[in-house]
Amino acid sequence: MATPRTKEEALQQMRVVWCAFILTIPLYIYAGHVLGSISWLSFPNSEKIFIILAVLNVWSYGWTWRNRYSPARSAFQDKPENIDAVRRWNSSWVVLISVAQCQSLFGFALQMGGRTLEQSLPFYAAGAMLTLWLWPRKVWEPKKTAALD
């Protein structure tokens, strides 16, 4: 992904990435169903381990939202013409959506470990919900024009 030069370009790039990430979730489900299992993912406690990892991932999502994305968004809203603020907002969003995508990957790993779709579905659903929550919105105010007297 190229470094955005404007806030509109950053928003457009974010929307393309968001669409790609949303489309990958059904592909993970399909690939997990069609491909055979991988032996090193089918150990006795794999489901418990992936649940623990998913909980830690949700915690990481919250931490990233609170400590990286929200301050970057606030700085961008304060100075929407500052390209560094735009890039910080963009890059923190990319980190956040990547963390969200990991939830779906845990479901895929469970399916590849020989588990059923029903056992993997909560991971896919959580990943989809976190990703859907991150639809890139226009967070800046339009320039106000002074009324002519």
Image (cartoon, rainbow, N blue to C red):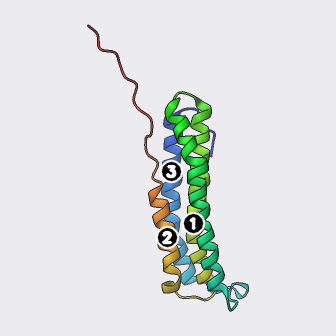
Q: Quadrant location of residue 40?
A: bottom right
Query: How many residues crowd around disc 3 within 10 Å: few (fewer than 14), some, or many (20 or more)?
Result: few
Q: Looking at the image, which residue is at 53% across and 66% down? A: 24
Q: Amino acid at mark 2?
A: Ala
Q: Which image quarter holds the C terminus? A: top left
The percent position of residue 18, horizontal first and vertical second, equals 50, 55
Rounded to the nearest angstrom, the CA distance separating label 3 from label 1 is: 24 Å
Q: Looking at the image, which residue is at 61% across and 40% down? A: 88
Of 87 and 77, nearer the camera is: 77
- Provide the residue designation for mark 1: 58
Q: Are marks 3 and 1 in contact (CB under 8 Å)?
A: no
Visible residue check, residue 81: yes
Tag of residue 124: none
Of tags 1 and 2, the one toward the viewer is 1
Label 2 sits on a secondary structure element that is: helix
Question: What is the tally of numbered marks visible in this picture?
Answer: 3
Query: How many residues crowd around disc 1 within 10 Å: few (fewer than 14), some, or many (20 or more)?
Result: some
Q: Amino acid at mark 3?
A: Val
Q: Are marks 1 and 2 in contact (CB under 8 Å)?
A: yes
- Provide the residue designation for mark 3: 16
The numbered mark, 1 or 2, whose residue comes first in the sequence reads 1
Label 1 sits on a secondary structure element that is: helix
Q: Is residue 23 above or below residue 136?
A: below
The numbered mark, 3 or 1, whose residue comes first in the sequence reads 3
Q: Are marks 3 and 2 in contact (CB under 8 Å)?
A: no
The percent position of residue 91, horizontal first and vertical second, equals 62, 46
- Provide the residue designation for mark 2: 126
Rounded to the nearest angstrom, the CA distance separating label 1 from label 2 is: 9 Å
